[in-house]
Amino acid sequence: MQLMTKELRRTFARVGSQDGAGDDARILAHFFNPTGVGDWYATEYDPDADGGGGMFFGYVNFGDPINAELGYFSARELGAARLSVRVEIHSELFESPRILGIERDRHWDDTKTVGDIRKEIGAVTY
């Protein structure tokens, strides 16, 4: 699956670095495992990093908010992930901007399912 659409590339290029924005950084892309846990919220993208494969910066949560963290993750590796037979990482585009600190805090509400959160924020799944 091609995670980086032309629209996402343009958006990352237009916004550029959000270094120093902290919890106010805008989430530009959300990648997720459609069969279970795994959420990657990208705030920045460097297409030239990782030997031209691209690197994201953002918040990564594998279902445990205590061990979730901010950091870099490889676009090449994320796109190559195979979760089970013919299932790949998916991406979604938000109709309105999402703020990193708010999305991170949503993961602490253990009464909501991922589906509940996606409906609540009006995410469009591709």
Image (spheres, grey):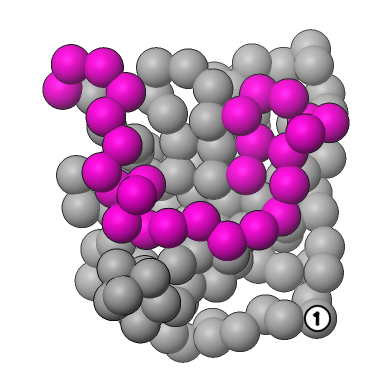
Q: Is residue 29 left or right of residue 50?
A: right
Q: Is residue 101 left or right of residue 34?
A: right
Please report the residue visible at 55 percent of the width from the left and 72 percent of the height from the top. Answer: 44
Please report the residue visible at 26 percent of the width from the left and 17 percent of the height from the top. Answer: 84
Residues shaded magenta: 60-86
Rendered image quadrant of residue 63? top right
In the rendered view, tell whether residue 83 sits above or below residue 121: above
Q: Does the magenta portion include 62?
A: yes
Assign the N terminus to one quadrant of the image. top left
Query: In the rendering, at what x and y percent does residue 116 appear?
Result: 61, 21
The residue at which mark 1 appears reads as 20
Q: Is residue 73 visible?
A: yes
Query: In the rendering, at what x and y percent does residue 9 appear?
Result: 33, 74
Q: Residue furthest top?
A: 111
Helix, strand or loop at label 1? It is loop
In the rendered view, tell whether residue 31 sits above or below residue 108: below
Q: Is residue 97 visible?
A: no
Please report the residue visible at 64 percent of the width from the left and 16 percent of the height from the top. Answer: 113
In the rendered view, tell whether residue 113 sits above or below residue 59: above
Crowdedness near tag 1: few (<14), some (14–19) or many (≥20) residues, C-alpha within 10 Å: few
Q: Is residue 98 left or right of residue 44?
A: right
Please report the residue visible at 72 percent of the width from the left and 81 percent of the height from the top. Answer: 19
- How many marks do you count on the picture? 1
Assign the C terminus to one quadrant of the image. top left
Q: Residue furthest front?
A: 51
Q: Is residue 103 left or right of residue 121?
A: right
Query: In the rendering, at what x and y percent does residue 45 appear?
Result: 47, 72
In the rendered view, tell whether residue 46 sits above or below residue 2: below
Q: What's the residue type where badge 1 is placed? A: Gly
Query: In the rendering, at what x and y percent does residue 17 appear?
Result: 61, 84
Q: Does the magenta portion include 90?
A: no
Rendered image quadrant of residue 23? bottom right
